Amino acid sequence: MQSRWESLLQPFQVEQEVGQKVLLDLFQAYSSAGRYYHTLEHIEQVLATVNNLRSLSQNYAAIEFAVWFHDAIYNPKANDNEEKSAEYAVTILNALNIPSSTIEAVYSLIIKTKYHQDIDSIDSKIFLDADLSILGASPSKYKIYAQLIRNEYLWLSPEKYRTGRKQVLQSFLERERIYFTEKMFLVEQQARQNIKEEIELL
């Protein structure tokens, strides 16, 4: 992951020491207590997926920065994680002297993870598809994901969790498409099957 981060920063001529400090802060954020799914493993998986869709992108650096920062601030009891993560990204990227056009794109992409429906560019399709790629994973991987999400909400009673989780999952099933890129659409049926099975188990 370190080499991935360094490659991302290289074209922007960020001092290595400064870049390392930001990376360390991100590692600490994603390793903080109470995280089970929104960890470095999630970031790694999303990075691998966006890389797979890279040839379609317009501003790949913005997508990759968005991946790194999109869950940097995560409190399952809060409802402004996306806004806080986006603001954190803006603060850090400004300090790294990343061009403002890229920073604006990063901010916009991260904000879109709140509802996963505001698709206005190919880059947002790539990023949002990658963030939800776990939904189309194999049934065994999906089951692990579902349990990790439950662990992040252990403070909720089983009944309240069941109600809230069902609403979230149902909202995905009600969409015309879960995935917007053709490559990710190949696992659309698997994602729908996984979601249906989780709803049945709740």
Image (cartoon, rainbow, N blue to C red):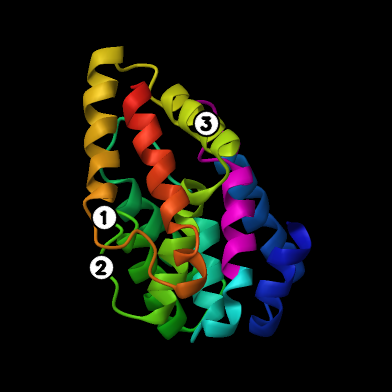
Query: Relative to the observer, which residue lies in front, 150 or 31?
Result: 150
| Element on which disc 2 rests | loop
Instruction: Please state which amino acid type lies under the numbered disc 2.
Output: Asp
Instruction: Please state which amino acid type lies under the numbered disc 3.
Output: Lys
Residue assigned mark 3: 143
Which dot marks residue 118?
2
Q: Which residues are magenta?
A: 31-50
| Residue 201 x %, y % | 37, 22
Marks 1 and 2 sit apart, C-alpha to C-alpha, by: 7 Å
> Pointer 1 and pointer 2: residues touching (CB < 8 Å)?
yes
Marks 1 and 3 sit apart, C-alpha to C-alpha, by: 23 Å
The C terminus: image quadrant: top left
Q: Is residue 66 magenta?
A: no
Q: Is residue 42 magenta?
A: yes
Query: Relative to the observer, which residue lies in front, 189 or 19?
Result: 189
Q: Nearer the viewer, mark 1 or mark 3?
A: 3
Residue 70 visible, this angle: no
| Element on which disc 3 rests | helix
Q: Residue at x 56, y 69 (%)?
A: 64
Which dot marks residue 115?
1
